[in-house]
Amino acid sequence: MARMVMMVFCVVVTCMVVAETYGQSITCDQVVSDLSPCYGYLTNGGAVSSACCSGVDALNSAANSASARQPACNCLKSFYSSNSGINLSNAASLPSDCGVNLPYKISQSTDCSTVE
């Protein structure tokens, strides 16, 4: 009986670990959705809206580990490169303009595989 309880316990713990790992993943759709209020700023500059900063903050909160930050970084790079109207200088300054401290620089030259 004790062996059966231990096996069930191990299965439950394994499921919790797997669920936590998948729970930390972030999708490109989420990245684009969070940053959609920022599109005007990213293309034209000017003042950063509170909705944009809320999106930047939400994205930063969702990407709370290296396993989530790396795909978010790749999504950002992909999004910026596929939208030729985006000013990369505005993109690089967006986190600081919103008072959000990112552990990596938003740049086409960022190696996302090294983001912690």
Image: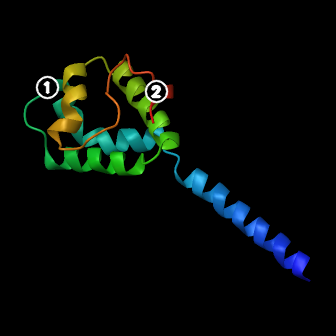
Alpha carbon of mark 1 to alpha carbon of mark 2: how far? 26 Å
- Using the image as rendered, state which of residue 37 and residue 16 is in the foreground: 16
The quadrant in which residue 43 appears is top left
- Indicate the secondary structure of the residue bearing disc 1: helix
- Give the image location of residue 57, x and y in percent: 28, 49
Q: Using the rendered image of the protein, determine whether residue 87 is visible from the camera's viewpoint.
A: no
- Give the image location of residue 96, x and y in percent: 19, 37
- Give the image location of residue 16, x and y in percent: 65, 63
Q: Is residue 17 left or right of residue 94?
A: right
- Using the image as rendered, state which of residue 106 and residue 75 is in the foreground: 106
- Using the image as rendered, state which of residue 93 and residue 4 is in the foreground: 4
> Which amino acid type corresponds to the residue marked 1 in the rendered image?
Asn
Residue drawn where x is 25% and y is 20% of the image? 88
Extreme-front residue of the structure:
2
The quadrant in which residue 69 appears is top left
- Mark 1, Cα crowd under 10 Å, few <14 / some 14-19 / many 20+, is few
Extreme-bottom residue of the structure:
1
When the figure is inspected, residue 95 is found, relative to residue 15, above or below; the finding is above
Determine which residue is flagged by label 2.
112
Determine which residue is flagged by label 1.
44
> Which amino acid type corresponds to the residue marked 2 in the rendered image?
Cys
Residue drawn where x is 73% and y is 69% of the image? 12
- Give the image location of residue 27, x and y in percent: 49, 42
Residue drawn where x is 13% and y is 44% of the image? 49
Q: Is residue 63 left or right of residue 83?
A: right
When the figure is inspected, residue 89 is found, relative to residue 66, above or below; the finding is above
Q: Using the rendered image of the protein, determine whether residue 60 is visible from the camera's viewpoint.
A: yes
Q: Is residue 8 left or right of residue 14?
A: right
Give the number of the mark in front: 1 or 2.
Answer: 2
Q: N-terminal of the two: label 1 or label 2?
A: 1
